[in-house]
Structures are given as structure tokens and as C-alpha cells.
Amino acid sequence: MIKEKYVALGKKPSAIRVLFEYGKVRKQEVGEDHVFDFSIGNPNAPAPDCVKEAIIDLLNNDTSFHLHGYTSAVGDLKVREAVADYLNKTYNANTDAKLIYISCGAMPGLAAVFNCLIEKGDEVIVFAPHWPDYKVLVDQVGGTLVRVKPETVNFYPDYEDLINKINEKTRIVIINSPNNPTGAVYNEEVLTKISEIMSAKSKEYGHPIFLVSDEPYRDLIYEDYKYPYVTNFYKDSIVCYSFSKTLSLPGERIGYISVTKDCYRAYDLALAIGGSARSLGYACAPSLFQFILPKCLGQTADLNFYKENRDVLYKGLTDIGYEVIYPHGAFYLFVKALEEDDEHFSSVAKDMDLLIVPSKSFGYPGYVRVSYCVDKKTVVNGLPVFKKLYDKYKGE
Ligand code: PLP
């Protein structure tokens, strides 16, 4: 028998993917320059030089013949040591190589973490709006995703709602900063507040509630905003990092999971993450891309590329009359739809070949997400189409 729930999942890709696939077909029909695709978070800034240099160096000088071979299932030891050293030096993370798991990117990392911590009926809290696939991953292990609403100035969590939503079934709270889709960056005050609430609730219920920090955008922060290192605030944190966005390598599938030595049963947890990933069929992240990491830790693609896009689009859209959340990190704008039904609004835009993602599947309807990791031409030529869309609603 084929499990029907997977047939259904296969039939219904995420709203992001539906638009992305549509855009590819549409570009063939009407030409690249006539489709304004702001759908997916596929970095358009080139990977930083360190990536190419490290690959060439490895290809030319590696004599181990293991460049394309299996590494240890949880990641090459030297790579794990390099990641631990980097985290200790940069963030005082108090970790070591045994507490680092090299993942095939954030999504498989999250899947492994959820799989080893969530039992059927457990609850996982997430702050809305959120990356839609958390729901798919939590559903898969029999958990229930519970949404906490944001305050609507900075799109930080509504703490009262968090307090009310945590109960004895809560196993995990997910945070994602800088945030997809709002671009919000959680500061020390936010992390302190979340940590205080979670510590009190863990004590009340007599078991640790883990904080899972999903960090594909950690190093994509503008101006002097900072995302402090979460384990320094809450010891039972699990950091799921990815190089997909910071090094512009989403197709190469590489990231890591890290916990601190002070975490609840830290070394058992690290073993469980490795075991869990294995049970899901993930072992040995791509070896070539593991081996480049020691030379690329802390590097990013050109942040100015995204910052310029953000500034042009933010100004362009607000000048037109759109209500836009000002993002301090990641590469998305969260824009108020011009009608209540964001899916309909997105489909009206789609008819103009403007591809923007409705926010319903982000657990927070009434908005659209505009991904600005696109080439400059799409930004500049897309703005008049946003104006046309606005005029259609506002009748000017
Ligand atoms: N988490 C968030 C918040 C994302 O936006 C994405 C991708 O867009 C992922 C996880 C998945 O990242 P990866 O490519 O590392 O699996």
C-alpha cells in the first residue's frame, strides 16, 4: 500500500514551491524578463571567493582520495573540530567536536532533532509568522505545531501568548532569527525573555523544554544588529545552522547542529541526533562541502547585494503606498496584502507575472512574502508591476 498522506503531500508542494515552479514554466512561455519572480529564497549573490578557492585547493592538492568518499556518519572529525573551535572563539559557545553534527542543511537537521525529541501527541511551539515546513516536519513525527502570535511592531513574540501556550505537552520551542518571512532579528532582550519563560515552565513541568534555533540566516544581518548566541541565554538550546543562504550554497546541502556542554544530557543528545538522522536515512553530509568549511566559517556572500535590494524595494514599495515590515536580516519583505485574502491577492499579482507568496501557510494570513535575493533587474523592473497591482486595488 502507498501511504495516502504522502501522496497528498507530494501533490501539494508548499505555496513557495508552487510559485517557483510556475515561474520556471512561465519564463519559458513569455521570456525571463517578463516574469518577476520574488517567490523562493534561492540566493542570487555569488558564493564568496573562499568557496571556490577552497574547492580548487582541495581538488588540486588532496591526496587522500577521500574527497568524494564517505566521511564519518556524523561528519568528518576535523570539520567538527573546526566548527566547534569557531563557535567557541566567536560566541564562547562552550561546545566540542562531539557535540557537533554535520548536517545536510537546516531542514534535514531539524528533521533529525524533531525525530529524536518528539513523541506522538507532544507539542512544538513556533512564533508566527514562520517558515511553513516546520509544520510538515512536526506532523511527520506525530507532534502538533502550536503557534504563538507576534506583537506587530517588531514582530517579536507576544510573551503572554507564549506563557499561555506552553503546557505539560510542550517539548520544543522553535525560534528563527533573522526571521523568514519578517526579517526580524531577536536581540538580547528577546532571548532573555524567552529564556526566562522557558526556564520557569521547564521547572514547573519537571522536564526540559528545548529551544531549537533554526539559523540559516544568522550571518545575514544588516547595519549593526546582532543575533546573540542562543546557548548563552538558554542552555537547553539546539542550534541548527545552514550554509545554504550565507555561502549561497542551497543546492549543496550542508549545515551543522550544535549544542553546548551544559545542555541537558548533552552528549546523549548529540548521539541521539546522529542516530535519529541515520534512522531517517541521512548520514555523511556531502564530503567536498564538509571539507571546505574550515576555510569558510564566518564568511558570507556579499551582504551589500541584499542590503541594496532591500533598500530599493522597501523604499519603492512604501512610496507606492504598501505597508511593509522593515527587515534587519535575512532577505525577505513582509508586505500587507491589499485585501484580506492573501491567496487571492497573490493570484491577482500572479496574473501580472508578479510572483509573491501568500502568508497563510506561514501561519499568519493577510500578508505576502517578497523574497529579495533576486537580481537587481528583477527589483527595478518589478517595482512598476507592484505599482500596477496597487492601482488595481486602490483605483488610481
Ligand atoms: N529554515 C528556514 C527558516 C528557511 O527559510 C529555510 C529555507 O528557506 C530552511 C530552514 C531550509 O534550509 P536548508 O536549505 O539549509 O535546508
Image (spheres, grey):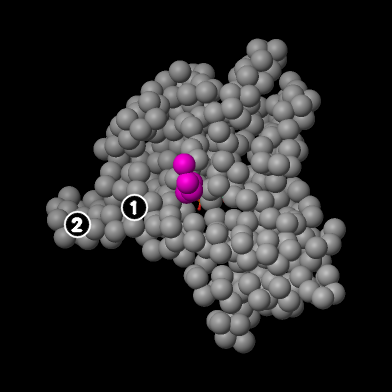
Which secondary structure lies at badge 1?
helix
Is 195 in the magenta? no
In the rendered view, tell whether residue 71 sits above or below residue 208.
below
- The percent position of residue 328, horizontal first and vertical second, equals 55, 47
Q: Earlier in the sequence, mark 1 or mark 2?
A: 2
Q: Foreground residue, 192 or 11?
A: 192
- The percent position of residue 109, horizontal first and vertical second, equals 50, 42
Which secondary structure lies at badge 2?
helix
- The percent position of residue 78, horizontal first and vertical second, equals 26, 38
CA gap, disc 1 and disc 2: 13 Å
Query: Which residue is depicted at the point 59% across and 27% down?
Result: 189
Query: Residue 46's quadrant in the figure?
Result: bottom left
Query: Which residue is depicted at the point 63% across and 56% down?
Result: 333
Q: Residue furthest bottom?
A: 30
Asked whether, in this view, residue 123 is left or right of residue 82, the answer is right
Ligand 1 within 8 Å of the CB at mark 2: no
User: Which residue range is magenta in the image?
Assistant: 220-224
Which residue bears the numbered disc 1? 289
Q: Main secondary structure of the magenta part?
A: loop
